[in-house]
Image (cartoon, grey):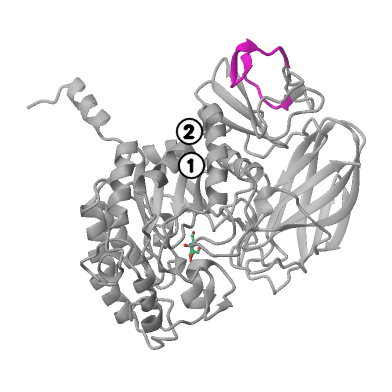
Amino acid sequence: MKKSRSKSRKVEKAAIDPMSWWREVRFGLFIHWGLYAVPAGRWKGKPVPGIGEWIMHRAKIPAAEYEKLAADFNPTRFDARTWVQLAVDAGMKYLVITSKHHDGFAMYGSKASPYNIVDATPYARDPLKELAHECQKAGIKMCFYYSQDQDWHHPGGSGNDWDYPNRTKEDFARYLKTKVKPQLKELLTEYGPIGLIWFDTPWWITKTQSLDLKRYVHRLQPNCLVSGRVGHDVGDYGSFGDNQIPVGRIEGDWETPATLNDTWGYKTGDSSWKSVEELLYLLVDLASKGVNYLLNVGPTAEGIIPAPSVERLQTIGTWMQRNGEAITGTEAGPFPYEIENCRFTQKGKRLYVMLMKWPRNRKLTLVGLKTNVRQARILTAPDKELAFTQTSGDGPMPSRLEVKLPAKKADPYVSVIVLDLASPAEIEPGILQQPSGRIELNAFMGTLHPSKTGRQIRLNPIGATESWFTRSNSISWSFTVSEPGTYRIEVGIVRGRRQPKWIGGHKLTLTINGRKATRRIRAQAWRDTPRAQYFPEAITRFGTVTFERPGVYKAKLTADEISPKNPEGVLLTSIELLPE
Ligand code: FHN
């Protein structure tokens, strides 16, 4: 039978991209909950340093001893509805909970292993069933974290070399077959539709095994996504490092898992709570880069989400109620680079400008937006139009938009200005001088010059250079100066994902507008940006440069010596030129 056009169109419509919900949500709740909440960071009366859920590993607790914690795990104050409501009220649209963390303990009623909350604790209930039910009722996606690689309880899993020092590849394969797959099957057949499986720490897993797990999940639930940490870049989306924030907008689908304090699993004494300002900054920043923000809470062994977490999420929720339109269902903003105190998201012809600071001069000034603005308003005051002027670019003078703002900021945290445009936003290409006078030469805006042989400079996922190990690699930029003057030069180098500490020591030469400066990289100051909270970016000063007239200029960074101490090479984020 001949297919009619309309019929085949219907078929196309029915095939929904399984990633589409994930791209809409932007903000989710991560929950690390397990036996580690019982010792809560202390073992035999002493504090154990590091994150709470790693206590078994850090204190090298024998599995047979750690197991006994199950007898004390009785979270009678757990209430699935309250947890889900907290996520909903915060504007979160998915919830990811540890079904099994590295300690190997299943937080649900598993038939594949008796080491689980129903069979091994006095509680004897399945909290994940209750959460799945509440998530379905509330219309948010239920998702499971599952530690597929590390399992410190199973003699075949990775990570526990104090109980099981002689594990082999065959033991690991057997563990995948006899524990991981049966447990995944339970999670994907007994809890309704699952949004994603959040795999983690792919240490031992081979590419074939990662692919096999991904296919296994998709066979059991074709629409269930697989996190990037299944290993070997075969996941459905990418996962940045813990609390890692990209430098600018990035291509593809990415998520940042992040903490509210420092630990993931509950730990007494960890009071490094991030402020609501910082948390909202990160939410807005990540959304503007098209990245999902998965924000963690670590409930207690009684089943309570700590009050400082609840208070912060509630305040974020109040902000989301007023301003969530600028986050949920939006795309990354049109500017590839960060703009000071300002982030953007967009939906069709609507551009959301999120102001972290209310401009003292009561003006929102943007350069480089080519599209005509039809109307400007504050998101929370839709009836009042804001006056604005817009000029188009001319040579080194970029197009410029100035919106008049009222004296009083629209929101105590982040104020959102809505710009309705004549067509989807278009931005002038290249690096433009910002209204503050600052010029930022981001690594990802530069041209990389790899050497003919040997290891090649490239960009890492967050947009910094990496694998820059030889002198024959370099990076260059061309950029537009609209305000002549003298600028001080600051070169930013970030801590690598696999380094416990920031490492400097390279000797670099910057040639800018014909002027050469050579400096040894060291931490003369630190960049003050929330992106640098866990991944510090050190600044090395390279003197000053003067531009006599407006125009297009060139800069080039080469390496004279690369410190062998840094296993990731030169990790340049950006060079900032700041008016003197
Ligand atoms: O080792 C885990 C850690 O305990 C926690 O679960 C985080 C969350 O992203 N993932 C691993 C470290 O990256």
Q: Which mark is residue 381?
A: none
Which residue occupies the foreground of this view, 356 or 446?
Answer: 356
Highlighted magenta segment, given as a residue range: 365-390
Predominant SS along the magenta part: strand
Which element type, helix, strand or loop, lies under badge 1?
Answer: strand
Residue 516 location in percent, x, y? 88, 54
- Say above or below: 151 vs 558: below
In space, the residues marked 2 and 1 are separated at their CA atoms by 8 Å
- Give the crowd class for mark 1: few <14, some 14-19, many >=20 residues within 10 Å: many
The residue drawn where x is 35% and y is 63% is 210
Kindly indicate whether the residue at mark 1 contacts the one at mark 2 (C-beta within 8 angstroms). yes
Circle 2 sits on which residue?
Answer: 328
- Say above or below: 290 vs 502: above
The residue drawn where x is 26% and y is 76% is 174
Which element type, helix, strand or loop, lies under badge 2?
Answer: loop
Task: Pick out the residue farthest to the left.
Answer: 1
Q: Earlier in the sequence, mark 2 or mark 1?
A: 1
Q: Would residue 349 be found to the left or right of residue 477 on screen?
A: left
Residue 334, visible in the rendered structure: no
Respond yes or no on whether mark 1 lies under 8 Å from ligand 1.
no
* Callout 2 amino acid: Thr
